[in-house]
Image (cartoon, helix red, strand yellow):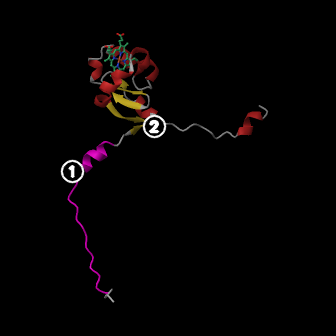
Amino acid sequence: MTDDSKTTVSAVVLPEDPKQESISLNVDKVYTKDELLLHSTDGDIWLAIDGTVYDLTAFSEEHPGGKKILLSVAGTDASKKYRKYHGDNILQRYAKDFKIGTLKIEEVNVSKGFFSRFKKKQ
Ligand code: HEM
C-alpha cells in the first residue's frame, strides 16, 4: 500500500509565449453601423464591404477611382458600389492592408408576433 498522505504536487511553469500578443491582436474588432458612420469625413474614411470594415483614409489619396467617390460612401456599407467597379482580385490584394475589423450583424426586430399581421388596424 502506498502512503496517500504524502502527495507530491508538481507544476510546470511555462515560459511566456511570445506568440500570445499577436494572437490577441488578430481577433477581429467588431464595429456597429453607428460607429462606422462616425468615420465619414475627409481625413477619416471608413467603409464596409461584405461585412469587413476598412480604413481607407490613407489609401483614399492614391485610390485609382479617386477620393471623392470613396467619400460619397464613407461610413456606410459600400458592397454594392464596390462590386460595380472592381473584381474580387483587388480586395484579395489590398484587404489585409486596410482591414480594421468586421461589421456587427444588427438584430432584426422580431417583437411583433406572427398573428399581429391579421389584427384589424385601428
Ligand atoms: C477596399 C476598398 C477599395 C479598394 C482596395 C479599391 C481599389 C481600387 C483599385 C486598385 C482600382 C483600379 C482598378 C483597376 O486598375 O482595374 C480602383 C478603381 C476604382 N474604384 Fe476602387 N477601391 C476600393 C473601394 C472603392 C469603392 C467603395 C468605390 C465606389 C464607391 C470605388 C470606386 C472605384 C472606381 C470608380 C474606380 C475606377 C474604375 C475605372 O476606372 O474603371 N472603389 N479601386
**Residue 18: assigned label:** 1
* Percent x, y of residue 117: 73, 34
Instruction: State the residue at coordinates (33%, 31%).
Output: 99
**Quarter of the image where the C terminus is located:** top right
Instruction: State the residue at coordinates (57%, 37%).
Output: 108
Q: In the displayed image of the protein, which residue is found farthest to the front?
A: 1
**Residue 26: assigned label:** none
Give the CA distance from mark 2 to mark 1: 30 Å
Please say whether residue 53 is one of the residues in the magenta stretch.
no
- Classify mark 2: residues with Cα within 10 Å, few (<14), some (14-19) or many (20+): some
Three-letter code for the amino acid on which mark 1 is drawn = Pro
Q: Write down the region rendered in magenta.
A: 5-26
Position of 103 relative to 40 (above/below): below
- Classify mark 1: residues with Cα within 10 Å, few (<14), some (14-19) or many (20+): few
Three-letter code for the amino acid on which mark 2 is drawn = Lys
* Quarter of the image where one finds residue 103: top left
* Percent x, y of residue 69: 37, 15
**Quarter of the image where the N terminus is located:** bottom left
Q: Main secondary structure of the magenta part?
A: loop
Identify which residue, 63 or 11, lies in the foreground.
Answer: 11
Q: Quadrant of ligand 1?
A: top left
Identify which residue, 92 or 102, lies in the foreground.
Answer: 92
Please say whether residue 9 is one of the residues in the magenta stretch.
yes
**Residue 104: assigned label:** 2
- Answer whether residue 32 is visible to the viewer in this image: yes
Identify which residue, 1 or 18, lies in the foreground.
Answer: 1
* Percent x, y of residue 106: 51, 37
Instruction: State the residue at coordinates (42%, 29%).
Output: 37
